[in-house]
Image (cartoon, rainbow, N blue to C red):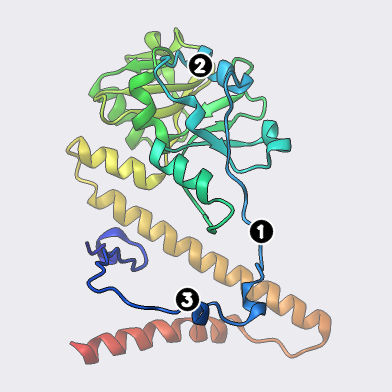
C-alpha cells in the first residue's frame, strides 16, 4: 500500500509486506556488529497496564458509565509501575498488541503502541480526573452510557464552523440536553460513527479536536472545505514568516551581545527561501 504524501499533507511513508521466498543458512553472529553498537543510547519508556480493580478505572467507569464488557486492563500508561498512579495519559491496546508488548518489551525497542484514550484533567473539573481523547472515542463510544448527547446537524455544523474556540451554549438548540450532563468532557454526535469530544463549561462548549479532525468531520457532513483549507494554509504561512523573523531577531540580538557582525533579516530570509527555489527549479527540470 502506498501512502501518498501529497494527498495527506505529510512526509512520505511507505508500508510494505515482505514475503520470505527461500530458506538460508544465515550466520546471525555476523550481524551483531561491534560491541559498542549494542549499548542502548536511550531508555525506552515502559508499558504499565492497569491491574484488576484499579482505582482510576472506577473513577472513569462511574463518570462515563462505561459498560462492564470494556477490557479496561488493556489500558496502559508509559510510566514505571512505582509511579504509574501519577500518569498523565492512558492508552488502549487490543489483546494482540497487549500480548506482544508484554512479551517483547524487554527485547524490542517499542516506541508507540495503541491509541490515546484518556488524559488527566489537572483539577479543571471535580467530577473525574480524566477527560476523553478524540483519538480513542470512536472505539470507546459504544461502551459509554453517560456524558453523551445526540444533537442536530445544524448545532454540529455551528460548532465545527465557528471561529471561536468557546461556543456559547445559548446559540445551540441542544443546550438543554447538554446542560443535563456534568461539566467536563461531553461527547456529542449526529452519527454514532463520528462522535466528537467537547469540553463543557457553565456557559460554553468547545470541540476538543484538531483543525484537521474538524475539516474531516465537515467533509463527512458534505461541506465544501476549500475556503477553510486556504485560510488555514495562509495562517500557517503567516505564522511561519513571523517565527522566521523572530528567530533572526533573536540571532541579531545574540550577535550584538557577543560583538559579532549581524546579518540583516532580508538577507536571512532570502537565504532561507533559496532551498525552496532550488526545489522548484528541480521539479521544473524533472517535468
Relative side of 45 to 192, left or right: right
Which percent across, then down, holds residue 167? Answer: 43, 27
Give the label on residue 61, or none: 2
Q: Is residue 114 visible?
A: no
Q: Position of residue 87 (x, y in %)?
A: 65, 36
Indicate which disc, 1 or 2, sits on the residue closer to the N terminus. 1
Secondary structure state at the residue bearing disc 2: helix
Quadrant for the N terminus in the image: bottom left
- Residue with the mark numbered 1: 43
Q: Mark 1 falls on what kind of element?
A: loop
Q: Nearer the viewer, residue 142 or 151?
A: 142
User: Residue 157: horizontal and vertical position, in percent?
Assistant: 28, 30
Q: Quadrant of the C terminus?
A: bottom left
Of callouts 2 and 3, the N-terminal one: 3
For residue 131, side relative to residue 264 (left or right): left
Local crowd size for mark 2, using a 10 Å CA cut-off: few (<14), some (14–19), many (≥20): some
Q: Is the residue 15 above or below the residue 31 in the image? A: above
- Contact, mark 1 vs mark 2 (Cβ under 8 Å): no
Answer above or below: position of 156 versus 65. below
Q: From the viewer's perspective, is the residue at label 3 or at label 1 nearer?
A: 3
Check disc 3 and report the residue beneath it.
28
Give the residue at x 59% y 26%: 51
Amino acid at each position: 500500500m502506498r501512502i501518498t504524501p501529497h494527498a495527506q499533507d505529510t512526509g512520505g511513508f511507505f508500508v510494505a509486506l515482505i514475503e520470505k521466498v527461500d530458506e538460508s543458512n544465515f550466520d546471525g553472529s555476523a550481524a551483531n556488529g561491534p560491541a559498542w553498537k549494542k549499548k542502548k543510547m536511550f531508555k525506552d519508556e515502559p508499558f504499565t497496564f492497569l491491574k484488576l480493580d484499579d482505582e482510576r478505572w472506577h473513577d472513569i467507569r462511574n463518570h462515563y458509565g462505561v459498560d462492564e464488557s470494556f477490557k479496561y486492563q488493556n489500558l496502559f500508561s508509559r510510566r514505571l509501575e512505582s509511579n504509574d498512579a501519577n500518569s498523565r495519559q492512558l492508552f488502549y491496546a487490543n489483546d494482540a498488541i497487549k500480548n506482544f508488548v508484554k512479551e517483547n518489551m524487554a527485547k524490542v525497542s517499542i516506541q508507540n503502541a495503541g491509541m490515546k484514550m484518556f488524559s488527566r484533567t489537572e483539577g479543571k473539573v471535580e467530577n473525574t480526573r480524566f477527560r476523553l481523547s478524540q483519538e480513542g472515542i470512536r472505539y470507546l463510544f459504544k461502551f459509554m452510557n453517560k456524558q453523551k448527547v445526540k444533537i442536530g446537524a445544524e448545532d454540529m455544523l455551528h460548532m465545527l464552523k465557528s471561529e471561536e474556540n468557546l461556543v456559547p451554549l445559548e446559540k445551540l438548540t441542544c443546550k438543554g440536553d447538554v446542560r443535563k450532563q456534568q461539566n467536563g468532557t461531553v461527547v456529542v454526535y449526529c452519527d454514532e460513527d463520528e462522535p466528537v469530544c467537547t469540553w463543557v463549561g457553565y456557559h460554553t462548549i468547545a470541540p476538543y479536536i484538531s483543525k484537521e479532525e474538524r475539516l474531516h468531520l465537515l467533509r463527512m457532513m458534505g461541506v465544501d472545505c476549500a475556503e477553510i483549507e486556504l485560510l488555514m494554509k495562509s495562517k500557517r504561512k503567516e505564522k511561519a514568516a513571523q517565527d522566521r523573523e523572530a528567530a533572526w531577531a533573536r540571532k541579531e540580538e545574540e550577535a550584538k551581545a557577543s560583538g559579532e557582525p549581524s546579518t540583516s533579516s532580508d538577507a536571512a530570509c532570502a537565504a532561507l527561501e533559496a532551498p525552496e527555489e532550488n526545489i522548484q527549479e528541480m521539479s521544473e527540470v524533472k517535468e
